Every structure is written in C-alpha cells, then in structure tokens.
C-alpha cells in the first residue's frame, strides 16, 4: 500500500448528537448447498455517541451476524450482499489507499458528492457527511484493521473464542495496543496493566503474565473487556457477554460495562435475548426477528407501550418474579421458521395472534413515528402511518405485563 488518506475532521458544524453509526438496509447472506440463508435481511440501526442500543430477539434472528457484519467479521461463506454501514471515525484516522481506489467510494464528504455517486435520500438515510461506509471495505484490509479494536471493539459470549490459549493475556494486549498506537513496548505494557486494573482484575501485574485458561470465567470476560477498551474505542459491540456467567458474575460484568461506558464515553451495542438485562442497560432498543428490525424505540417505550406483536409476545414471555416460582407467563406460539423457509410478507405471520390478510402479501414497511423527541419505528400493518405509531392505534392488542425500567 503506497498512500493513505486521512479521514477529514468531522467539522465544527457536526452536532454532538449526530449519529456515530447508521446502518441502512444491511443484508448478510450465507450461500450454502441447500440455498441462501438471509441471516440479516435489511437491518436499519442508528446509534449516537455514548448511547446504549440493545439488540434483542430470540436465538437465530440475526443479532450476532449483525454485530459481526459491522466489524467485517462474518465467517465464510457469509457475505454482506447489500446495504451501508456509515461510521463516524475519529478525525485523523488513516484509512487506506489514496483516492481513486475502491476505498475512495467508502467515505463521503458533501463536497465530494459528485465523485461519490448520488447523495442518499436525507429523509431515509439522514446525513452521512464525514462518515465512512464500512460495508464495502475488505475484511482483512488496512482500513478495517485500523478500525477494529481502535474505533469499534467487540466482545463475545465465549471469551475463549477470542483469547488465544497459547499467548499470555499481557502479550495479546500489548500486541493489540502497539498495532494501533505508536508506543514503545514498555509504554504498551503500562497501558495494558492499566486496562487490566480498570476492569477490576486483582493483581493486574501478575495477570499480565497469565494465560486465559488460568482465569475463571468472570476473570476471562474481564480480560476480554480490557482488550476491547484498551485503545479507547468509540463503539463497543457486546454480544451476549454475560450469558455464560453465573448470576452474581453477570451482575458484576454488567456494572463494569456500564462504568467503562461512563468513564470512556463509548457508545455500546449490547446484544442479548434477556429483557431483564435490556431494562437495566439500554437507552434504545432494536427488536429483531428473522433478520429484520421489527421495532425500534427507547427503553421506556419498549416496556410501557410496546407496539409490535412480536415485542409484545417477547414481553409476555419474560418470567414474572412476583408470580409464584417466577414462572413464565406464556411462551410465543410456534417456533422461529427455518431460515430457508421464510414466510412471504411479514416474517412474524406464522406466529402472530393479530395477523390479518394483508400480513401475508407484502413485507410491512418500517413506519417511523413523527411526534416528540423519542422517535420510534414499527414494522406491522396495524401501524400504517406515523400517527398510528405515535398514538398506538393498534393499542387494542392484548395487554402486556409490566416490567420495571431501571435506567
Ligand atoms: N456459518 C453459517 N452458515 C449458515 N448459516 C449461518 C451461519 N452462521 C449463522 N447462520 C444463520 O444466520 C442466522 C442468524 O444467526 P445469528 O446472527 O447467529 O443469530 P442470533 O445471534 O440472533 O442467535 C441463523 O439462522 C443462523 O442459522
Ligand atoms: S404485520 Fe401482521 S403478522 Fe406481522 S406482526 Fe403485524 S399483525 Fe402480526
Ligand atoms: Mg448470537
């Protein structure tokens, strides 16, 4: 690689609440012998600096592949086939070959619009000024290597999948730090030990020389978080980071993530199937079903006035701690369709108690409410326009149980 381009400064006019990440129409597919698995099938997401967006949904609905797509970490034969992943990288990040190459198309300044193709429809996509589209960037190319770990980090449910068993925690941390920042080995070691201290690992100097198999599950997850935050990323994607842990450790890790987020001012995409965790940690929530976001709203709206029948069914199926034995109130009828056997029209039609004829024809559009400062979107025929989304015209759907929102 001969030349590099620098990301332009975001500019004084960039509003502090301008999105950090804007995902438009993202599709990720696996071409397998039996057919094409549409794992992510037109996902739309927006996340602002410092915000926590929870992605919630049953197993297999495309949460992890959405996170991995943003990181360009989808395993073969998976491939991003459509859509855009606009990210506001920090000014000064060096991002790849000089203008004229393929990567040139991936970043946008309004002044460059002619050379970059038509501007996106501002109503549909919002401004992408000063943002980089990660979707076309090669997985192993210099741009994604510069972004992964430094701008966006990801932690996984199973830390053993991302911590090497044959290198010490300290070596992995210092290598990652030195990949991104020009530091001497001694300075990188100092930064690594500081990261281990920050995440609450006792005796961080000793832990620096430990191997991952020498640590307990909770300690390993802390080491993973140390790796993820060591270079002060703007966005952390946490994929079910507490699912494999016991309840006490789960709580400690959630508290730690929240504290790290406050201290570092990072935004977080927190992937979970646990609505209890959502209530504790989310600012906004995207509910996914069969590779699509079917409802997006803030956490208060999710628990007090859910709109989409799938969201309502998920809420009705959380254990009620007040009820004897914490029993499930109900389960969602049927099972998630096989990804190779998706229904036409609304993806939820085979399980929905509120389905009408119109649901089987066309895929319902995502309709975004217009009122107030808490925008919300719903993809269901019962909410045909922004007024219906805002006012809950489908509110005669079954009542739902109440849950407590702690954040
Ligand atoms: N390597 C793969 N090959 C084929 N299909 C896959 C592969 N990885 C994931 N999928 C499919 O993609 C869909 C979404 O998976 P995933 O994002 O892991 O779901 P979630 O994280 O919501 O449980 C699932 O239907 C899954 O079977
Ligand atoms: S569009 Fe129809 S099937 Fe889909 S969630 Fe709404 S009512 Fe149910
Ligand atoms: Mg997953």
Image (tube, helix red, strand yellow):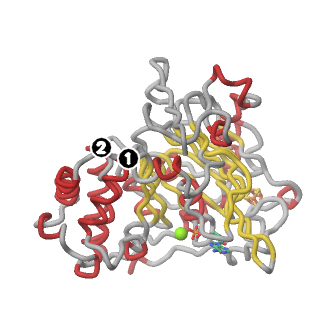
Task: Tell me the residue that label 1 is attached to.
Answer: 233
- Few, some or many residues within 10 Å of mark 2 (<14, 14–19, 20+): some
Q: Reading the chain from its start, which is encountered first: label 2 or label 1?
A: 1
Residue 399 in view (yes/no):
no
Q: Secondary structure at mark 2?
A: helix
Q: Kindly indicate the quadrant of the structure image that contains residue 316.
A: bottom right
Apparent side of residue 254 relative to residue 276 in the rendered image (left or right): left
Q: Marks 2 and 1: which is nearer the front? A: 1
- Few, some or many residues within 10 Å of mark 1 (<14, 14–19, 20+): many
Q: Kindly indicate the quadrant of the structure image that contains residue 186.
A: bottom left
User: Which mark, residue 264?
Assistant: 2
Residue drawn at the location 43% of the way across and 45% of the way down: 151
Q: Ligand 2 is in which quadrant of the figure?
A: bottom right
Residue 88 in view (yes/no):
yes
Q: State if disc 1 and disc 2 touch (CB < 8 Å).
A: yes
Where residue 354 sits: x, y (%)?
75, 61
Residue drawn at the location 26% of the way across and 69% of the way down: 169
- Vertical arrangement, residue 230 with respect to residue 131, above or below: below
User: Which mark, residue 267?
Assistant: none
Apparent side of residue 256 relative to residue 322 in the rendered image (left or right): left
Where residue 93 sits: x, y (%)?
44, 37
Q: Is mark 1 within 8 Å of ligand 3?
A: no
Apparent side of residue 276 relative to residue 85 in the rendered image (left or right): left
Q: Secondary structure at mark 1?
A: loop
Residue drawn at the location 43% of the way across and 75% of the way down: 161
Q: Camera-side residue: 276 or 152?
A: 152
Q: Is mark 2 within 8 Å of ligand 3?
A: no
Q: Camera-side residue: 224 or 407?
A: 224
Where residue 45 sits: x, y (%)?
59, 46
Q: Camera-side residue: 127 or 272?
A: 127
Q: Camera-side residue: 281 or 153?
A: 153
Residue drawn at the location 61% of the way across and 53% of the way down: 138
């Amino acid at each position: 690689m001969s030349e590099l381009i620098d990301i332009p400064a975001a500019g004084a006019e960039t509003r502090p609440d301008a999105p950090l990440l804007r995902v438009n129409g993202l599709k990720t597919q696996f071409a397998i012998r039996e057919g094409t698995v549409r794992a992510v099938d037109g996902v739309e997401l927006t996340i602002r600096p410092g915000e926590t967006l929870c992605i919630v949904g049953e197993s297999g609905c495309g949460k992890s592949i959405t996170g991995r797509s943003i990181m360009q970490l989808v395993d073969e034969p998976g491939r991003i086939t459509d859509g855009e992943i606009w990210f506001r990288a920090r000014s000064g990040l060096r991002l790849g070959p000089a203008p004229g190459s393929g990567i040139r198309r991936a970043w946008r300044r309004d002044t460059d619009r002619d050379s970059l193709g038509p501007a996106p429809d501002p109503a549909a996509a919002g401004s992408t000024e000063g943002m980089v589209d990660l979707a076309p960037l090669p997985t192993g190319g210099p741009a994604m290597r510069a972004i992964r770990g430094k701008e966006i980090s990801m932690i996984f449910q199973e830390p053993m999948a991302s911590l090497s068993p044959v290198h010490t925690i300290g070596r992995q941390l210092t290598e990652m730090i030195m990949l991104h920042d020009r530091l001497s080995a001694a300075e990188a070691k100092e930064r690594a030990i500081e990261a281990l201290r920050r995440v609450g690992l006792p005796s961080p100097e000793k832990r620096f020389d430990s191997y991952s198999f020498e640590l307990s599950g909770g300690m390993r997850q802390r080491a993973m978080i140390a790796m993820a935050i060591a270079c002060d990323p703007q966005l952390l994607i946490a994929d079910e980071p507490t699912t494999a842990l016991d309840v006490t450790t789960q709580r400690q890790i959630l508290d730690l993530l929240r504290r790290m987020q406050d201290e570092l001012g990072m935004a977080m995409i927190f992937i979970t199937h646990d609505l209890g965790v959502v209530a504790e940690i989310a600012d906004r929530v995207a509910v996914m079903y069969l590779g699509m976001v079917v409802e997006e709203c803030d956490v208060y709206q999710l628990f007090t006035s859910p709109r989409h029948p799938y969201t309502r069914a998920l809420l009705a199926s959380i254990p009620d701690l007040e009820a004897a034995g914490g029993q499930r109130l109900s389960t969602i009828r049927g099972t998630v369709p096989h990804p190779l056997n998706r229904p036409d029209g609304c993806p939820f039609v085979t399980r929905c108690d509120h389905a009408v004829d119109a649901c089987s024809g066309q895929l319902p559009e995502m309709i975004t409410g217009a009122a107030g400062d808490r925008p919300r979107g719903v993809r269901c025929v019962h909410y045909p326009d922004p007024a219906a989304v805002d006012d809950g015209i489908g509110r005669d759907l079954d009542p739902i149980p109440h849950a407590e929102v702690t954040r």
